[in-house]
Image (cartoon, rainbow, N blue to C red):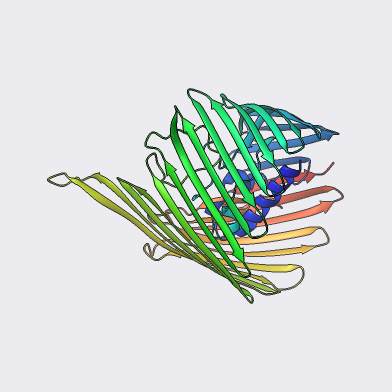
Amino acid sequence: MRIIVIFLLFVIAYAQDSLIYPEALSPQALEEFENEGKVSFRVSFNEKIDYRLKTQFTYKEFGLYLLNQGGEKKTEQTTSLSYSSKWINMGIGHGRPHIAKGLILGNTMMRFTPNLRNNAGIRPTKMTVKNYDYYKELVFFGSSIRQIGILLFRYDGTYCALAQYLQKEWQTGLVVYKNEKFFTEAWTNYKNNDLRASLNASLASGKLNHACGDVFYRHDQLSLFISSVYLHPEFNTVKTDSKWGSGLKPGSSAYLVGISLLHSSWRINSVAYCILKSDHEEQRFMLDLRYKKKTIKIDLSYSAKKILDLCDSDQFPFAMTWQNEESHICKMNVKIQIQKELQLICQLQGDLVHSRSYAGIIRLTYRKSGDLLRMQLSKCRSWNNALYFLRPLTASSYSIRRAPKEETIYMDLLYSKDIGTMKIYVLLRSEGINVGFDYKL
């Protein structure tokens, strides 16, 4: 349970850091913020009517998770059950395992921000069943005695056996996977207040499948981070719990370096990586400038990305040629606490290469005595690239939207009220109306 709580706190912090980087947070992770309480219900009146009911019941060590959703013609139901005690942890239903860097590599160099600490190290293994239909089938049984943990599970047809050793500063683990092939994976991680270092590797068919490592070091106001990864030309994965970048394919190698400096009210973050392959190359550089005072917070971001692919030419003599894709995206996010109850957020982003691409939002939030009123106006357009921004979904969550090719204006007006342990809300948006509630038992 402690591991799950730590993970949720990490995700919440990551979500806050990603306000200016919505592409760094998966839609699934955002959806998990939707259910604040034990019972959550939402009905949407858009082009079609659909609903979602999520419930969670706990009694001592047992947990029951139910999901019922559908529309006018089709309904679906998902059920998950868990048991957790001091010595035993088990579950059956739909869930998500996280092991090392993600069931044979997943969460590096993709969906990251210049927040270096979030990118570093390997977090302890966790197994959770939840009431979300996008999770795969998961059955697991685990036991822990002191610092040693043993875990057996089946995830979406893959059978796994895992052993890990945890102590205050060290974490070591070994896991065996079986689907069409046998995979073995091992990792070790060291962590203290100023240093994080990890190594992770896997074998498939007796050959090195992948290897990666990273080091994060902090001294006073300065932080440094380096990371690298290698994939075998016949690289095989199991079921990644997140995605690699578009260029990290079998046979790739990747290298990353980052630096962070804190000075007075300013924080400067910078990170750069490159992915190399014989027919593909990807380079990215990100720079953050963050200013924070009591009533104002300013985030400035610059991200440059360049992708080279070796492709067949469509012109005589039809030789191989390099195709170039490039973007230079600038972002600005300003958060002003006008009064104790009133907050204003203005965000603007655009691509210096594609002048027709931009996305801007103005969000005004008023909170007082259990009442919440949130209004957002969004105007956006993309042109041969992708710009992402957040729109209100419920009183406690947002949805990720990609700017369409045509210039579009979105209006969102959300009102929420606390009635005892129940939070009810109404969301008026350009596409229709959402009505729902969260109830804490």
Give 44 or 212, whichever is nearer the viewer: 212
Residue 182 vs 346, above or below: the answer is: above
Residue 230 vs 207, above or below: the answer is: below
Q: Is residue 269 visible?
A: yes
Q: Is residue 77 visible?
A: no
Give 381 or 385, whichever is nearer the viewer: 385
Q: Residue furthest left?
A: 317
Q: Is residue 154 left or right of residue 440?
A: left
Q: Is residue 360 left or right of residue 385?
A: right
Report x, y in % for residue 167: 71, 44
Report x, y in % for residue 300: 53, 69
Give 371 or 299, whichever is nearer the viewer: 299
Assign the N terminus to one quadrant of the image: top right
Report x, y in % for residue 3: 72, 43
Residue drawn 37% across the image and 40% down it: 251
Assign the C terminus to one quadrant of the image: top right
**Location of residue 132 by image quarter:** top right
Q: Residue furthest bottom?
A: 264
Give 228 or 301, whichever is nearer the viewer: 228
Figure disc tally? 0
Report x, y in % for residue 225: 53, 59
Residue 235 vs 123, above or below: the answer is: above
Residue drawn 55% across the image and 55% down it: 215
